[in-house]
């Protein structure tokens, strides 16, 4: 099973990789992927995350260009979010929905000019390589696979002291094809010193039963005093298979603020690695996962404090329904020289049923002696006191459950700096809990409180 | 209004209420006083239908209906309201959403027309003003970060919005300073009318200077051991509860 998957993916990768600019990376990737073994239950970083649904897939081909249905078109606009965007459908750029190539900051690897090519050669794969140096479990073979297969990708380059006014949206959409297919998405974003931008990285699909495997890899290079606000939204139909990695390199006094959302699918695995490479950098890493049915959703985060005077604050919340399983592994690694580090991690989980599961593990590795670190993880069910309070006000038990569940993650939504993005996500998440619309209706009346206040 | 007969109730297998009787007619205000551990708060929780409060004997009839078999939300819709001693904080659920959900369900059950968002907001703002809470409290999480007095005023606001027929105030005065107490008492007094009854559970006589009861009952050891008019509260203030408890034990 694993052998067939491995061989198929290797063959597909060598078939795909044709960009001379990336030849070296491809070769290294192919070599590494060929040598790597597929993780199993004994592999620590994959202990609770079975690849069964992936390995039993028969991925003989890569995707082809698909037609754009109304459903996909709607998914692509993210509730008419005002943002220049690139939209890929089954890995192919859709010209009609994509307008961001008009920006000087955005290009594809295949369309890069000489200066942009130089940037790609200089940076692509380097942030990822830092994870390998630190021996975090997040330097895994799917990253090698992405290196092996990458032929095209998105380059975003924000120049020195430039500021993008609007968020930039990059969407990878899938739609079912006749046969299962796999695709490798790649994004490299470079913020030069003093640059500021908002990136919305978006994975979605139509509502048909998906038969795709997406292996996405994003590298973010954040320069001195630069700031990135990153949204990574996974809103695919539940049969989509998704493995995604986000690797971040932070320079002096830079900031990475992120919100990662996973709705859950048959297999979703996310690795997020933050490298504090130079002093004064700060990262605010928040996330929400809400798997249901029989979904499996895994977040592995790793914050590498390599130098003194950096701060990180991480908050993840999960709500597991039905028979879903979630895995959260939050590692904070404080290197010997990283004195005066301030690092916090909180992971709270809510189990809505007796059959839902969560495996949470905060992992602190501290080698410096003058640091402040706090971490905590909780697993709970809906609070009896709060349930009774709501019921004693006439609210039905079911609606109270929906309101409390939503409230549990709404705190993080309320904190999002982009209200237009929060207002896209709010109804989506509210309906997730109130499958019967009458149960979520009171969650969506927020807007009125803003009028004539 | 409400008729409680021979009520026995357990909390975690411990017998707390031991044959409590109480009749309240429309428009009456009954104060229930008593020492700590007498079962005062248990009474409120039992009447409101909290899980883990098990009724082992007796009947409770509200407006002609036996409520003991009802879920808490059904009792609320039938016109019972419990103002909590310790209102719960619910971060992430806005006060406004919560209030709207509450009022919608109670009104729907009582056959009153639904309020649309605009009408409701207007009403909620009026009630905010009535209890001296800033309108910004509507947008905040339910009771989240509210001071003790703000929480009690939020309870009062809910009571005003729901217009219940029976209000149970569970030690609403505890932890309030005189100013906050007066605001709460004024709110309660403004709601008194010929069709609405109150059970005011309190440890201190002070509250009853502001909410003047028709009857005062002393709850001790799980049952009412003495009843009287408002002057009984003053007597209790002076003498404490000891003499009543021993009298009860002697009789039993």
Image: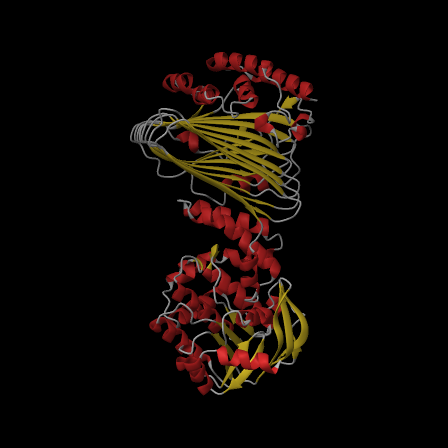
Placement of A106 over or under B16, stated as above or below: above
Placement of A26 over or under B137, stated as above or below: above
Asked whether the viewer can see residue A49, the reply is: yes
Q: Position of residue A175 (x, y in %)?
A: 61, 34
Residue at 64%, 22% in the rendered image: A61
Q: Position of residue B159 (x, y in %)?
A: 48, 72
Q: Position of residue A389 (x, y in %)?
A: 54, 63
Q: State which quadrant residue A140 falls in.
A: top right
Image quarter hosting the N terminus of chain A: top right
Image quarter hosting the C terminus of chain A: bottom left
Q: In the image, A275: left or right of A245?
A: left
Residue nearer the viewer, A326 or A32: A326
Residue at 43%, 65% in the rendered image: B151
Asked whether the viewer can see residue B212, the reply is: no
Placement of A206 over or under B48, stated as above or below: above
Residue nearer the viewer, A74 or A302: A302
Residue nearer the viewer, B213 or A356: B213
Placement of A280 over or under B237, stated as above or below: above
């Amino acid at each position: 099973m694993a052998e067939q998957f491995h061989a198929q993916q290797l063959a597909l990768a060598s078939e795909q990789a044709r960009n001379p600019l990336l030849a070296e990376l491809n070769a290294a990737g192919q070599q590494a992927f060929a040598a790597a073994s597929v993780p199993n239950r004994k592999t620590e970083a994959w202990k609770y995350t079975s690849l069964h649904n992936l390995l039993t897939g028969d991925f003989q081909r890569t995707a082809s260009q698909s037609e754009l249905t109304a459903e996909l078109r709607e998914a692509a606009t993210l509730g008419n979010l005002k943002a220049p965007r690139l939209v890929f459908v089954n890995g192919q750029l859709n010209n009609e929905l994509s307008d961001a190539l008009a920006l000087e900051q955005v290009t594809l690897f295949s369309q890069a000019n000489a200066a942009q090519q130089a940037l790609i050669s200089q940076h692509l794969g380097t942030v990822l390589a830092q994870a390998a140096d630190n021996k975090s479990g997040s330097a895994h073979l799917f990253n090698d696979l992405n290196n092996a297969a990458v032929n095209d990708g998105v380059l975003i380059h924000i120049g020195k002291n430039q500021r993008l006014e609007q968020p930039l949206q990059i969407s990878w959409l899938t739609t079912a094809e006749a046969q299962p297919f796999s695709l490798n998405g790649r994004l490299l974003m470079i913020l030069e010193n003093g640059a500021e931008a908002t990136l919305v990285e978006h994975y979605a699909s139509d509502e048909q039963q998906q038969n795709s495997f997406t292996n996405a890899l994003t590298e973010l290079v954040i320069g001195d005093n630069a700031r990135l606000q990153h949204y990574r939204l996974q809103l695919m139909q539940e049969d989509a298979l998704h493995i995604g990695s986000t690797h971040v390199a932070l320079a002096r006094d830079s900031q990475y603020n992120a919100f990662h959302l996973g709705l859950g699918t048959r297999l979703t695995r996310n690795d997020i690695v933050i490298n504090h490479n130079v002093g004064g950098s700060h990262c605010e890493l928040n996330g929400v996962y809400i798997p249901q049915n029989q979904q499996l959703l895994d977040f592995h985060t790793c914050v590498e404090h390599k130098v003194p005077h950096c701060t990180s604050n991480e908050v993840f919340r999960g709500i597991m329904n039905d028979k879903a399983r979630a895995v959260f592994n939050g590692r904070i690694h404080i290197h010997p020289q990283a004195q005066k580090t301030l690092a916090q991690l909180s992971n709270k989980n809510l189990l809505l049923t007796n059959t839902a599961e969560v495996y949470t593990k905060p992992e602190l590795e501290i080698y410096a002696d003058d640091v402040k670190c706090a971490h905590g993880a909780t697993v709970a069910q809906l609070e009896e006191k709060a349930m009774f309070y709501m019921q004693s006000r006439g609210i039905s038990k079911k609606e109270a459950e929906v309101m409390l569940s939503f409230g549990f993650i709404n705190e993080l939504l309320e904190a999002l700096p982009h209200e237009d993005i929060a207002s896209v996500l709010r109804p989506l998440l509210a309906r997730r809990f109130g499958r019967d619309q009458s149960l979520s209706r009171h969650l969506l009346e927020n807007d009125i409180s803003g009028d004539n206040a | 209004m409400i008729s409680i007969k021979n009520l026995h109730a357990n909390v975690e297998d411990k017998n707390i209420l031991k044959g409590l009787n109480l009749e309240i007619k429309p428009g009456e205000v009954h104060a229930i006083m008593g020492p700590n551990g007498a079962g005062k708060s248990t009474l409120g929780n039992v009447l409101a239908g909290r899980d883990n409060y098990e009724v082992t004997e007796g009947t409770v009839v509200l407006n002609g209906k036996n409520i003991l078999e009802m879920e808490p939300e059904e009792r609320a819709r039938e016109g019972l309201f419990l103002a909590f001693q310790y209102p719960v904080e619910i971060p992430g659920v806005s006060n406004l959403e919560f209030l709207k959900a509450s009022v919608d369900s109670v009104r729907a059950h009582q056959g009153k027309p639904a309020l649309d968002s605009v009408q409701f907001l207007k009403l909620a703002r009026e009630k905010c003003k009535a209890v001296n809470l800033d309108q910004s409290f509507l947008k905040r999480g339910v009771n989240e970060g509210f001071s003790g007095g703000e929480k009690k005023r939020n309870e009062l606001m809910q009571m005003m919005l729901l217009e219940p027929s029976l209000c149970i105030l569970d030690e609403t005065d505890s932890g309030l300073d005189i100013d906050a107490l007066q605001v709460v008492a004024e709110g309660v007094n403004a709601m008194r009318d010929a069709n609405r009854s109150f059970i005011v559970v309190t440890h201190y006589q002070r509250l009853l200077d502001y909410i003047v009861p028709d009857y005062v009952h002393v709850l001790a050891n799980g049952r009412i051991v003495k009843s009287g008019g408002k002057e009984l509260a003053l007597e209790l203030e002076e003498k404490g509860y000891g003499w009543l408890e021993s009298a009860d034990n002697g009789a039993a």
